[in-house]
Image: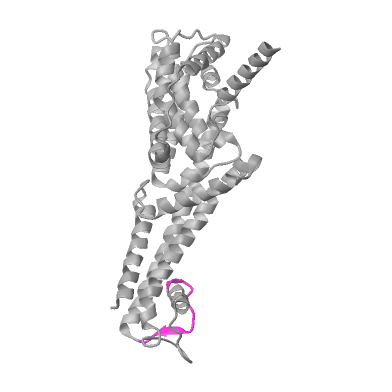
Amino acid sequence: MTFEQMGGAALMALFLADIFLTVLYARAGTGLLAPHWNRCVWLMVSGVAKMAGRYRSAVLSFAGPLIVIALIAFWALGLTLAAAFIVRPELGTTIRPSSGETPTDLVTALLVAGNSLSIVGGGDYAPHSSGTRLLFLINSFIGASVLSLVLSYLVQVYSALHERNALALTIDLMTGETGDAAKMLTRLSQGGDFSDATSTLDNLVRPLAMIKEAHHFYPLLFYFRFNDPRYAVTRFVFILLDLATLIETGLDPKRHRAFVCSSPVDALHRCAALLLETLDQHLAAENRATAVTETRPYEERYETAAATLRAAGIEPLLNHRSYADRRGEWQPSLARVGQALGYTVEESDCRQRVARTTTQRRATRHIV
């Protein structure tokens, strides 16, 4: 075996290990090459999106499908190149065409390697020794196996994406399509009675847990986003975390103890926090310095939510500071993930847009 063939075998092993860790081992961050490749493609699409102006969100919506195509092409090219390095020294000796001379250049080696990896097969070049026949057999097995694994992987990714969108839409509808956790809380109650709210939230725990694990199993989901902000993963995570924070700090623990201390509320809070942690850990590492230290806007946000609760007949506690402290625990992570995915603050927090509009109106009145 020549040095070139040993290099090709090492490269083949590297790409097969990357496919194994990405597709079969299925844990976020365990791939050798795929996570870095996906991130590079995302950064390139993000760079184009920045120049697209008002079409920025539309451009970013193509990132997920483009990353899928780029990843398949990356693996196919890597395996073909590795096989070509193994095949090239054998051209003209143990690997020959049916007639004529045998070119020994890299392009010919790539053609022969691609044919040997393809499940279709074909081509004029054939092995003429036991070793090269075995090589062609192994290559065909690798090609067929990788193709079936990748296709199965993509089916799982798009199935998980469908479930994530369904969950995001469900949560948005539960807020009355406002994206406001306080509005969702009022809709869970019946004039201040939360007796049926526990079972309603319990129905959200399982699909949320499945989405959390889907992001852990299939990191490609990180890069799928849509023009409609209601499908933004940061938005429905924000709604659920804000809802749990409002329940813990805004409702009277004596009057609503059965609801505030219920297992579904705690499970929903923890599961949403774990999903955010997964996204933050594997997607927003370079934005780790992003932090939010000013708590006054959170206190103002709590007052707005409290007004919504009062209008629905629910008397909230005066826990502005407690709400601000609890929100300060998860808001920085949410801001980092939103920035990494290219979401604006308003796309994640609809009340931020409302608050900003109100502030601008007040400033305009003051000037007038």
What residue is at 39 percent from the left and 79 percent from the top? 88
In the orientation shown, which residue stands out farthest toward the bottom? 100
Q: Position of residue 14 (x, y in %)?
A: 34, 62
Dominant secondary structure of the residues highlighted in magenta in the image:
loop
Looking at the image, can residue 162 be seen?
yes
In the orientation shown, which residue stands out farthest toward the left? 1
Q: Is 17 on the left or on the right of 334, as rendered?
A: left
Q: Indicate yes or no whether the magenta region holds residue 123.
A: yes
Q: Nearer the viewer, residue 268 or 350?
A: 350
Looking at the image, can residue 61 be seen?
no
Q: Position of residue 157 (x, y in %)?
A: 47, 49
Q: Is 190 on the left or on the right of 294, as rendered?
A: right
What residue is at 54 percent from the left and 27 percent from the top? 349
In the image, residue 317 sits, relative to residue 15, either above or below, namely: above
Q: Position of residue 217 (x, y in %)?
A: 39, 46
In the picture, the quarter occupied by the N terminus is: bottom left
Marker count (numbered): 0
In the image, residue 266 sits, relative to residue 127, either above or below, namely: above
Q: Quadrant of residue 85?
A: bottom left
In the orientation shown, which residue stands out farthest toward the right? 368
What residue is at 46 percent from the left and 60 percent from the top? 74
In the image, residue 101 sits, relative to residue 168, either above or below, namely: below
Residue stretch rendered in magenta on the structure = 117-128
Q: Nearer the viewer, residue 314 or 229?
A: 229
Q: Indicate yes or no whether the magenta region holds residue 19.
A: no
In the orientation shown, which residue stands out farthest toward the front? 367
